[in-house]
Amino acid sequence: MKRDTILSMKLPVEGRALETYTVREPRKFDRPARPFTRIAYAAAHVVADPLSAQEPWLEAAVDWDATIAYRRHLWSWGLGVAEAMDTAQRGMGMDWPASLELIRRTLEAARDVPGAAVGCGAGTDHLAPDPQLGIARVIAAYEEQCAAVEKLGGRIVLMASRALTACAKAPDDYGRVYDRVLTQVKEPVIIHWLGEMFDPALAGYWGSKDHAKAMDVCLDVIARNANKVDGIKVSLLDKDKEIAMRRRLPKGGVGGPSDPQRAVRMYTGDDFNFAELIEGDAQGYSDALLGIFDAIAPAASGALSALAANDRAAYHDILAPTVPLSRHIFRAPTRFYKTGVVFLAWLNGHQDHFVLVGGQESARNLLHLAELFRLADQAGLLADPALACRRMRQLMATHGVAS
């Protein structure tokens, strides 16, 4: 679609130079009029409290009102909220007590929103990783967090465990932990396999640094516990690995409390190839649990509505320009992607500041953020270009760059 140019400003480029960039009018997206044909969760970020007296490197200071308001924004576009995940800086600024409070507040807010879906991260992050930990302590840590989430009425996303990675001696240790935890959950969970590009402490998860061998272990766990597994979210940034695993998941008849014929779902966590994976192929498709959906909620919703209407041309027209944006936000070091997600929320007026929990607004350089600005504009995702330009100039000024 043609979009008129409306503003221009100078942005930094390689070589310590400034270059004029022209901003176009934003794309317009409608709220969904029908249910999606894919389940779609956005892993939501937290909004820091910049006026807190807490030291940002030591304690998480959260603006609860703004944080919950952002979840209402995501729900308004028909997306579910995956709460207290890595996008919310879980284990990277947000500890377990703060994460549990976040889960509680989100579940409470969801009660007022018809159809609001919430998945709640449960892991072992209150247990410090140590090679001397026993597997029994890892199991107990998972049990503690799962019980806390279930007590609040939440559905569990079973997060990968740094503590398990640190102390596991063999693939069977993973099976022992997951078998025990899954037999006790009340409702089927989403297992989250978070790759080492997102969290280096999780390298070798499932007992092998070879993803193919690790996949075999994970699939065996799922096969043994299929009635307690809604799906698996795979965050390896490799579409071929995800497709290969998707084709090996139980296809139906695995039982379960609500649907005796349900299949185990693949939830893509691939922020590089999500458009292709969600569309799928003749042998299946992936649902979504994505950090990038936090940043591109209107476009994600519009594309999913187009897919539900079987308008694949419109689906790709909307999502195609968001893929370069996502690949840029999630570029290595991938764990710093939260900085880009919050930056875009700030540009679009969802929060009044560009401050992250843990001071991670400093994790990306000005050139990276300037390119993010350009790519967001090219995707039509600067909702108020005048505001976005003012804030970009403000950021540049703090870096000593005049525009």
Image: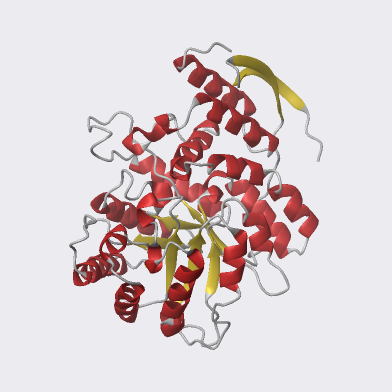
Q: Position of residue 80 (x, y in %)?
A: 50, 59
Left or right relative to 285: residue 160? left
Q: Is residue 280 visible?
A: yes
Q: Give 32 or 231, whichever is nearer the viewer.
A: 231
Indicate the quadrant containing the N terminus: top left, top right, bottom left or bottom right: top right
Q: Give 347 or 249, whichever is nearer the viewer.
A: 249
Q: Residue at x 23, y 70 (%)?
A: 135
Q: Give 136 or 132, whichever is nearer the viewer.
A: 132
- Quadrant position of residue 182: bottom left
Q: Position of residue 67 (x, y in %)?
A: 40, 44
Q: Is residue 257 visible?
A: no
Q: Position of residue 320 (x, y in %)?
A: 71, 48
Q: Position of residue 51 (x, y in %)?
A: 30, 28
Left or right relative to 316: residue 200? left
Q: Is residue 403 above or below residue 179?
A: above
Q: Residue at x 30, y 52 (%)?
A: 99
Applied colour scheme:
secondary structure
Q: Is residue 307 above or below residue 57?
A: below
Indicate the quadrant containing the C terminus: top left, top right, bottom left or bottom right: top right
Q: Give 289 or 248, whichever is nearer the viewer.
A: 248
